[in-house]
Every structure is written in C-alpha cells, then in structure tokens.
Image (cartoon, rainbow, N blue to C red):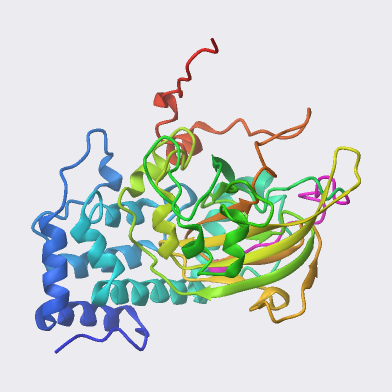
Amino acid sequence: MSQDFYPPSPDLGTFLERVGNAYLNDPEFKAAFDAAVKGVQPRPEGTEDKVWQDWTDATGDDLRAFFEAWYEWGRTQGVHDGLDFIEKFSWITYRNDAGMDFVTSGPGRDMLADFTNLQGLQMDDPASKALVDQWIKELGPKKMADYEPGDWSTFNKFFIRELAPGARPIDARLDPGVVVAPTDCVINMIVDNLTDSTPIPVKTVTMNVRQLLDDSEYASCFTPGAPGSPGGGTAVSCILLPDTYHRYHAPVGGVVVEARDDIGGVYYGMKDFPALLDKGNVGYGYDYSMFDDFRRGYVVFRTPYVDHEGNPDGHGHVALVPVGLNSIGSVRFHDKFRNITKDSPPVAVEKGEEIGYFQYGGSLNILLFEHGRFPALQLLMGQRIGVLEETKRSDFLFRNFRRTTPRRVPPVS
C-alpha cells in the first residue's frame, strides 16, 4: 500500500515513521530510492568532509537517520554552516537522473514537501529563539545595525527581519529609467535575447520563460514576437545569500498588471547544487532551467520608459520572479500584490516598495526585461560594487573564488 505523506507530519517522530513505512511498504517509493542510490556518483575531487554524504548502498534506515540528524542539527546550525545538510542531501541528485526523478516526482517529492513543512514548524517554534541569539552574535553589531529591532521570538520572525529606516535608500526614486536591486543579492547571469528555450552562456542550458511565468500571456513580452520587438529580452539572476536580507522589493515603479505567489513546485532537485556555490561568482554559468519547476511566484510591472532627454518613451514590462529553493517552503507576497489577474485593476507600485518575503532556506529572484531595454549592469562612481569580506565568509559562500577561471574573449581585429 502506498505511503501517504499528507496531511503534513505534526512532529519528527511521525515523519520518520512515514519514511520507514514508505521504504518497507510502498514499492514505488522503494524502487525510486533504490534507483537513485544506484546512480550515486563518486565523490568529486576537493569535496570537503563536512559537506559530503556518501549515499552509496543507502537503505531506508539510512534515509531516516539522515533526516533525523538534519532536523536535530536545525536546532544549532550557525550562520556559516547553514547549507551543509542541504549540500549533503544534494549528492543523491548530483549528475544523477534517477536521483532527480526521486526528489522531483511521486512519493519522494511528497516526502520532501512534508519535511520542508516540518522544518518550517521547527523555525516557528519558540524554542528556535536560541538559534536567533546565535545568529545575532555571529552576524555582529555592524550587520545587525541595518535592521529594525522587532519580534524575533522565533527564527522565522528573525529571518524575515525588516531594514532599519534609511538602511537602503532607493536610488533615483523619481527617475523611471533607473532599475534598482530587488533585494540584497549577488547579481550575475545576464542573458540577452531570450526565447522560450534560450541557451545561457558558458553552459548549454535553457530557461523556459513561458513556463517560468506559468504560461502567463505576459511571457511574450520577453520573447521574440512581442509587439514592436525584433528579438527576445534579458534575464538577470539575483541570488540571496543565507545570512542576508530576505525581503524583496519592486525594481521599477509603475503598476502591477499581474501577480501570483501560489505556483506550486518542487523544493529540491538540483543536478549540481555544489556548482551553485562553487564559483567565484555565485551562480555564474549555472543551469537555471531547473528553476522552471521550483516553488515560485511572479510579478509583472508595467513601467514608463524615457528617452535620453528624459521625455516619455512609451511603456513596457519588467517581471520579478521570486524562486524558493531547498528548505524554502514559502514565497509570500503582501496582500496588496497577491493574485492580481489580467481582469483585475492594475495596482500602483513605487520603485523600492516591498513586495513580499522568503522564509528560511535558499532563494533567488530572476528579473526579466524586454528586448533592448536592459543591455548591461551600469554603475555610477561612488556606488557600492561589493564588500571586503571576512575570509571565513568568503571561504563558505564563495568557496572556489581563488580558482575562478576568467572568461576569454577573442581580441578585436
């Protein structure tokens, strides 16, 4: 008989019992897990012991023990080891098609959704206050000065902490031609000339814009065939790091013409999760096609364009796609921006206005622009381009930055 992971487990004991029963009594679950284990790849050279988990010959008992350790570790994990268990679990999908099948479909997917919900309950428990105190100590007074003190009685309340007034002034608030970062993030992966299935530079991968926007009619604004557009648009990746601000804001002003925060999807299923972190530039050259199926939402803005003299140059569209990864169980919009349809009145929005937030886990925002409207990242003198990091943070979040290979371009003839 098939093991049902719904309704969500109320506690760890119930969840572990369900996992054990699934392996023993659900042929579909056991076959999928055994196939995933059979496809496990050898340990890549240079993998650190603390993030390695050998899934070779693993059984249902091993899976139960792993989840139990992961849950218990959630009571004590610190700022600089917040991804260790996610990476340990990811070796079951590392370059492993059967592993990907196990975590993204059927009872394996349902198991992970149940565990993600359980982790959310854990981070909402008042007992998680000890974890809050640990993070505040590790982040230090300099970083914590950016945040408004609030009700941090649980870790999830702390994780979505709000900025102190004036901590992130919005650049050129009244200039519609200036785009601002939607959150604190590492920005990379500018992909020009998007199509429904666009190759991304460095690796031959794809990103299905129409699927990313859940078949919204506004997807055509960013692909060839848009009115007056000779080609596709641009995508920009904004990756949120675990210890930074986890609310996201409007990158442009205007009106919201469509918005959803309820697109269901998987939480796990990265074929090469270590590669997301294992670059000098986090996420550079990564395969973004998998995010088409992750838990996500999207906001489509209609924004005014201006010409070089500052005069009106019509209107166009920009999309913001918040994507929840791994332990993220929530992509939450504020009521003002929730479930706006093409039949709803457009909702006015100011540049920098808060749209919503993520709760604990990994996450990113993808920005989409129309053809020819966002050709490059362009900074003015005196604007922030990065920070001089403590080496322990660089070693954790930018693991192989010392070995990053520069892209080589042919000389101009």
For residue 215, above or below residue 341:
above
For residue 107, above or below residue 302:
below
Q: Position of residue 206 (x, y in %)?
A: 41, 49
Which residue appears farthest toward the top when viewing the image?
A: 413
Q: Position of residue 345 (x, y in %)?
A: 77, 79
Q: Which quadrant of the view contains residue 63?
A: bottom left
For residue 1, above or below residue 129:
below
Q: Which residues are magenta?
A: 155-174
Q: Is residue 301 left or right of residue 231?
A: right
Res. 7 visible in picture: yes
Please report the residue visible at 79 percent of the width from the left and 58 percent of the height from the top.
Answer: 253
Q: Tell me the quarter of the image containing the C terminus.
A: top right
Q: Which quadrant of the view contains residue 297?
A: bottom right
Q: Nearer the viewer, residue 291 or 191?
A: 191
Please report the residue visible at 46 percent of the width from the left and 43 percent of the height from the top.
Answer: 283
Residue 147 painted magenta: no
Residue 165 painted magenta: yes
Q: Nearer the viewer, residue 68 or 117?
A: 117
Q: Position of residue 113 (x, y in %)?
A: 36, 74
Q: Tell me the quarter of the image containing the N terminus.
A: bottom left
Q: Nearer the viewer, residue 320 or 145?
A: 320
Q: Is residue 230 left or right of residue 74?
A: right
Q: Position of residue 88 (x, y in %)?
A: 28, 53
Res. 149 visible in picture: no
Q: Is residue 55 left or right of residue 264?
A: left
Q: Nearer the viewer, residue 250 or 248?
A: 250
Magenta segment's dominant SS is loop
